[in-house]
Amino acid sequence: MLARQIVRLSSRRTNLGSIYKSGHGPELQEPTGYLFSRKPGVKYEKEGWENLWYYGFYGAMVFGSIGLYFKPDTKVRTWARAEAEKRMEARGDILTYKHTDHVI
């Protein structure tokens, strides 16, 4: 019985034409031949959301970049190197190496 209901519901067709004819669908804008439907010489007026988008998006990018620049170094390799240097100092090993000129 459940299988019949699933088949019946899946085979149902919707008439998309009736949805658009009811006045709730998108309105068609006729092509004007101009880029972004703006005539040349007409000054562009910003919409209300644009400044919020620009300042919010780029502000978040700057804030995130600064945060990533100053984030602490939490790599295992960095910790292991510092730990190894600390242990070598405790044993009395030399951490710096003298440069020798090797001539062949």
Image (cartoon, helix red, strand yellow):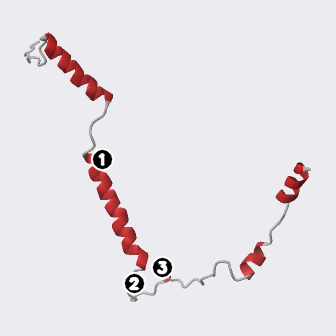
Task: State the count of labels.
Answer: 3
* Residue type beneath disc 1: Leu
* Secondary-structure class at tag 1: helix
Residue at x-position 39% and y-position 69%: 53
Indicate which disc, 2 or 1, sits on the residue closer to the N terminus.
2
Residue indicated by mark 2: 45
Front-lying residue, 20 or 9: 9
Characterize the local packing of mark 3: few (<14), some (14-19) or many (20 or more) Cα atoms within 10 angstroms: few
Q: Is residue 47 above or below residue 62?
A: below
* Residue type beneath disc 2: Glu
Horizontal side, residue 40 vs residue 11: left or right = left
Which part of the image, by quadrant, shows the C terminus? top left
* Residue type beneath disc 3: Leu
Residue at x-position 30% and y-position 56%: 63
Mark 2 vs mark 1: in front: 1
Mark 1 vs mark 3: in front: 1
Residue at x-position 63% and y-position 81%: 28
Residue indicated by mark 3: 35
From mark 2 to mark 1, how far is it between C-alphas?
36 Å
From mark 3 to mark 2, how far is it between C-alphas?
15 Å
Residue indicated by mark 1: 68
Discs 3, 2 touching: Cβ within 8 Å = no
Characterize the local packing of mark 2: few (<14), some (14-19) or many (20 or more) Cα atoms within 10 angstroms: few
Residue 36, horizontal then vertical, whole percent: 48, 79
